[in-house]
Amino acid sequence: MSQETQNWTIDDAEDLYGVKRWGAGYFSIGEHGNIQISPNHRKPDVYIDMAEVLAEMEAEGIQFPAVIRFHDILRSQVEILNETFRDTIETAGYEGEYVGVYPIKVNQMREVVEEIMDAGEPYNYGLEAGSKPELMAVMAYNENPDALTILNGYKDEDYLTMALLGRHLGRKMIVVVEKFSELEMLVRLSKKYKVDPMIGLRSKMMVRSTGKWSSSSGDRAKFGLSIAEIVNAMEYLKQHDMLHCAKLLHFHIGSQISDIRKVKEAITEGARLYAKMVQMGMPLEYLDIGGGLGIDYDGSSTTTDSSRNYSTDEYVADVVYGVKQICDLEKVAHPNLVSESGRAITAHHSLVVTNVVGEINPGATDFDITVEEGEHVLVSNMRELVGANDLHPQERFNDAAAYKQSAYEAFKLGILSIREMAKIDTMYWLVLTEIHQKLDEETRQIQELEELEDTLASQYLANMSIFQSAADTWAIGQLLPIVPLTRLHEKPEVRVSIADITCDSDGKIGKYIENNSISDNIPMHRLQRGESYPIGMFLTGAYQDVMGDMHNLFGRLTEVHIFSHDDEPGAFYIEEIVPGHSAEKVLETMQYNTDYMAKMVKKAIDKQIRKGNLAPREGVRWTDFYERCLAGSTYLRYDKKA
Ligand SMILES: *Cc1c(COP(=O)(O)O)cnc(C)c1O
């Protein structure tokens, strides 16, 4: 062990990867250098060792990549949000209640929705749907007559009729009108089906959030009614003797609000509008502030797109006190408060675990570069740069680049042999590595030389698809923390970036957390032959879990559902394993008939048997092999002992 490695502590690893900064109390690094999880906010001293989880997964025969869901984290987040609202409402002397809803779009997995409903029952926590199929799910899963079901998104007759069915079943289903024509349709249908709807109106907000979702508000927003339309809606409802059905004012200024000032502005605008609508004669009871409660993905507590500059306590206080102040001024009763926090409820509870299955590093190729009799002058030129540490790094870099370019020209003309070209290439990377090691404060300022850090970084190939498991890192440059799950007590000695196994050069991660800032690559440990190197991509529970696609036909991941339990060894047990998509399953979604495919391959094998090119037993083995692969995972099967 080198001196440096001995001096490395888990505190250094914590500084580097910032696990506690983004871990929200759930994730940290244990004394043995493994990630540890403390999934229950009520029992902060109960830790689950990630290495033990991985060992149990292996014992169960679960292959990488897999999604691990910590159900206790989900429950904790529901409890924290609801209790923070309750406590703040009590302290503030606020006269309404908090009746939140979980927007299932953020993660529609049945197990996730069930767990949230179960944890939220004492608080009458409800659900939100934004489309017809989501409405069908929430109809079945929110049976609590005291919890709200909020219906957003664009609606047709079936959608609205389904909501009226909900009213017949005694549910508090609130149809949020996104555009005026929905109101006309709803009034007509409720007369036809003889049931009073509960109506919400979505307001187009003037306040603009910052970040990726800023277009959710403002004049050109896709959703919501203008102030004039809201006034018209009141007249329209009055005309149809349905004003008593108007129950809720809704707004949503966008997801992942990074700056608390935008929350304050939105509350001021929304609460004022609420008060004016009540004064105008609408019998509203609820103010729905939408989603937007952010997650500190990069742990910086700033207003960058991947962070937030406030705590949940602060958010809730700004909502409760903000609404109270305006309603008191306007002499309007305090509304019940609804929020539609999705990201904040689900982001922490799941992560993707996978292994590094290879390394791409042009500088690490082993090739004999010793002098040969009569070698081409280009080879000897490049050799002169090897070890030439006295040369100015910029000059040495320029020479190396020029020699390499000439060598390629010469190779294309048939002047250099393939062995000579291989030598030049090998020495070129050697020279770059040497230059990089010798850079000092001053020479590091030179842009070309500074970029060597990136040029020389290895790529670690992770057994996963970014498009399936972390769509937003590709689509909108979302940052998700990536950390080795073990060996954190060892100094990570190589700089790497992570690439996935899709045949797409976009299939890589471009942003990493390093020492509380954002980097293009990240230090990780050297791979050890015969040992797997497990890494985790964290905070994937919101959106990432469900938005992925099957690029290259890499399918959904195997899921491992974990519950913490004090009496179990390691304080956890695997409650359920949901198998990932097989190759067969993803092929079928593309209209392949896999029985037919197996039959065709078998027929071809049989033909070779008849011709005597394959022994019958051998043929059977090949047929079985093809069928086994059809039934198997779409990802790389990687036996670490191999
Ligand atoms: C997406 C969405 C949400 C969820 O937002 P989060 O920022 O994930 O909490 C809530 N309400 C509406 C209307 C949405 O479209």
Image (spheres, helix red, strand yellow):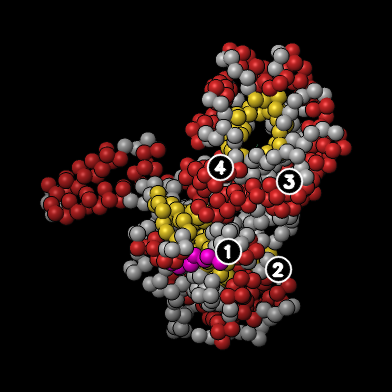
**Mark 1 nearby-residue class (10 Å; few <14, some 14–19, many ≥20):** few
Counting from the top left corner in percent of width and height, residue 623 is at 22, 49
Q: Residue under label 3, please give it.
A: 89
Where disc 3 sits, the SS reads helix
Q: Determine the residue located farthest toward the right in the rendered image.
A: 329
Residue at left offset 55%, top offset 84%: 6
Picture disc at residue 121: 4
Q: Disc 1 versus disc 4: distance between alpha carbons?
A: 23 Å
Q: To which quarter of the image does residue 335 belong?
A: top right
Counting from the top left corner in percent of width and height, residue 202 is at 71, 30
Q: Amino acid at mark 4?
A: Glu
Counting from the top left corner in percent of width and height, residue 474 is at 58, 50
Residues tagged 4 and 3 counted as in contact (Cβ below 8 A): no
Where disc 2 sits, the SS reads helix
Q: Residue under label 2, please give it.
A: 447
Residue at left offset 65%, top offset 21%: 182
Q: Amino acid at mark 2?
A: Gln
Residue at left offset 56%, top offset 26%: 170
Counting from the top left corner in percent of width and height, residue 248 is at 70, 30
Front residue (pair 347, 3): 347
